[in-house]
Image (cartoon, rainbow, N blue to C red):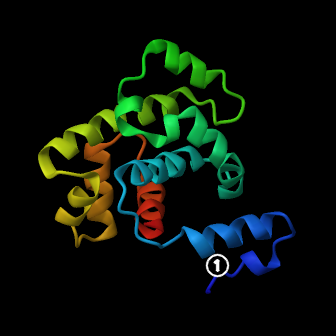
Amino acid sequence: MSYCSHIPNMPEPARNLHKNYHDNYYGFPIHNDNELFGRLLMEINQAGLSWETILKKENFFRKAYSEFDIHKIAAYTEADRLRLLNDAGIIRNKLKINAAIENAKTIMAIQQEFGSFEKWLEHHHPKTKDEWVKLFKKTFLFTGGEIVGEFLMSI
């Protein structure tokens, strides 16, 4: 397996965490919309933080966000927003939490039109990175160039 050049030089346990992600997830196609959404949610939450922080919190994210179930998250209430804002296991950023909920609603609309989030991505392929970023910024909340680029490379 080929790794980013910095991974072999990382101290444990960070090296093992990143190695596991690269060996089992990064760059492997995802065909499940909830998992695609989960990957986008994780990338959004990484903004301004290290990927290691997000990897350490992945199970907490999964639990807090209903196993990344798009339909459940799209139906979150104000009480759910407050619950997430008070969950020490995840990133408690109001903008990122709101983006997760609103993006779930957007993906539900995409599913209605295209059949799935995956088919929507395939429909727009191929595009340049700049075109993808414009599309994501027009479609989703909290999706800048780095977030979109990393999301697309990871899937």
| Front-most of residues 105 and 62 | 62
Residue type at mark 1? Cys
- Residue lying farthest top? 79
Asked where in the image residue 71 lies, by quadrant, the reply is top left
Please provide percent x and percent y for residue 96: 51, 35
Please provide percent x and percent y for residue 142: 43, 41
- Residue lying farthest left? 113
- Residue lying farthest bottom? 1
Quadrant the N terminus occupies: bottom right
Q: Is disc 1 placed on a helix, strand or loop?
A: loop
| 77 left or right, relative to 131 | right
Quadrant the C terminus occupies: bottom left
Please provide percent x and percent y for residue 58: 63, 48
| 124 left or right, relative to 56 | left
Q: Decide: is 49 above or below 2.
A: above
Q: Decide: is 94 above or below 132.
A: above
Q: Decide: is 141 above or below 88.
A: below
Counting labels gives: 1
Residue identifier under label 1: 4
